[in-house]
Amino acid sequence: MAATPVTLEPTTLPSLRLSAKYSGLRIDAVRTNATLEAACTWGNTSDGGMNRLTCNNDDKSVRDWFISETKKYGCHHRVDEMGNIFAIRPGQNNNLPPIGLGSHLDTQPTGGKYDGILGVVCGMEVLRVLHANSITTYAPVAIINWTNEEGARFPPAMLCSGVWGGEFTVKYAQGRQDLEGNTLGGELKRIGYMGPTPCSFEANPLLAHFEVHIEQGPILDVAEKPVGIVRGVQSIRWYNVGVQGREAHTGTTPMDRRSDALLGAAKMIVETNRIVTETEVASRGGRATIAVINSSPQSINTIAGKVNIGLDIRAPADSDVGLIEKQCREGFAKICQQHSLEMTFDNFWISPALNFDPTMVECVKQSSSQIGCDIEIVSGAGHDSVYTSRKVPTAMIFVRCKDGVSHHPAEYSRDEDCAAGAEALLGAYLRYDDYIRRSTAKI
């Protein structure tokens, strides 16, 4: 989904210029991209993509690799009860929680090599720069691999950062099931990553959270800019819609006597598209998609009596998501009446629109300006930073991806753009660490 550019009011924040002692620090572009390739060793597919679902054997292998690599650069590790991994490098003031540099290593079943993975790799590169230059930052730093961001195996998305951020309970999250009935908790135990640390901000705090992620939209690619400054994330809601009709023989049931659940669902898909392309929400960036459809009894000569569809609604404003939901409910109800169907409409996940912390965003802005980038974006997709922002100052950096393609093996970011993302993260992180140093000195 494409992200949405925004216009900012002039900032009133103080300058967050990079300290002179850090001005010569640079990321190693070759090393960054080599690390990215190494991170894709497990779960890569013949078409150049990735299939590394949460808690499968490839996910265990990449977790083991992540811990092994980050140990080389002075990190100790905390693994919490949702499998989130925190690779922590001590700072000068270890009474402070660490500044987090996080994203995720799980992928979609037909995903690419950059979504999530690049963010973890950029954090690892910052760690290596600090280690190579014998830099001890003021606050500790934590490189984080958040579990099950994609939600592809255990929906919903951003599940385990959501537990840490207080959106979901541990019991709920550990009990989420895949299509085979395996629970997330059971699979974490199987691969050895149900850790002893409680999964919450209160038990395992961070001071702040930065995240690098590919844009997953076309704005940066069209502008020919390697990185963008993320101001916030648009509103998202997910729904399970059940359509109940009546099974009947396809050859003996007249067309005017049918209660065809699949026909009703098909019309609901068309109605959803009409709402976000022909009504007032279209001009305000409203989007709605039905990409999951399951019907039964799956017999070629039996009319479908039951269908479940998954509805995804998004817009920059919560009010427009609410309006799209209302129009879908009304449109779907008319379709059900026309075809003698019954409907259930379950809104099982809500992620309200949010703005990231102004000081954190300013750190990203000033760091990005050093590499000639000034485009500011509202994310069209959810990320782990949605839930970290509920507890700590948070900001994101987007990296250009070719044609805005994501969740597909063709997903691609140029080597130099990946390196630019790591460079922007390094500068933003060091600026914020200095800001914390100065702020603490005033207390």
Image (cartoon, rainbow, N blue to C red):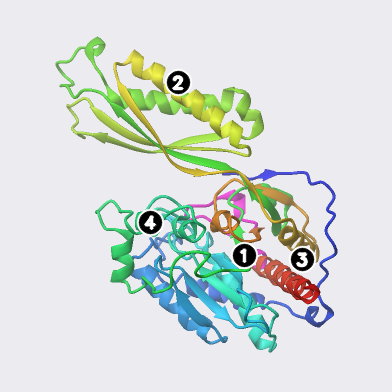
Q: Is residue 230 magenta?
A: no
**What secondary structure prevails in the magenta region?**
loop
Disc ID at residue 209: 1
Under mark 1, the amino acid is His
Whole-angstrom CA distance, mark 1 to mark 4, is 22 Å
Mark drawn on residue 29: none
**How many C-alpha atoms fall within 10 Å of the one at disc 2: few (<14), some, or many (≥20)?**
some
Classify mark 1: helix, strand or loop. strand
- Residue 300 versus residue 24 in the image, above or below: above
Residue located 25% across and 54% down the image: 181
> Which residue type does callout 2 highlight?
Gly
In front: 69, or 249?
69
Q: Which residue is mark 4?
A: 173
User: Mark 3 to mark 2: distance in Å?
Assistant: 47 Å
Identify the residue at horizontal 61%, vertical 63% (top origin).
Answer: 211
Most foreground residue, 274 or 171:
171
Q: Check disc 1: other Cα within 10 Å, few if <14, some if 14-19, many if 20+.
A: many
Is any part of residue 245 visible from this angle? yes
Between marks 2 and 1 in the image, the one whose residue lies nearer the viewer: 1
Residue 134 position within the rendered picture, expressed as x and y whole percent measured from the top left: 68, 89
- Assess disc 3: are there few (<14), some (14-19) or many (≥20) residues with their C-alpha within 10 Å of its C-alpha: many
Q: Position of residue 363 (x, y in %)?
A: 75, 64
Q: Which mark is residue 331?
A: 2
Instruction: Residue 367: give its label.
Output: 3
- Seen in the picture, residue 250 relative to 289 is either above or below; the reply is above
> Magenta stretch?
399-417
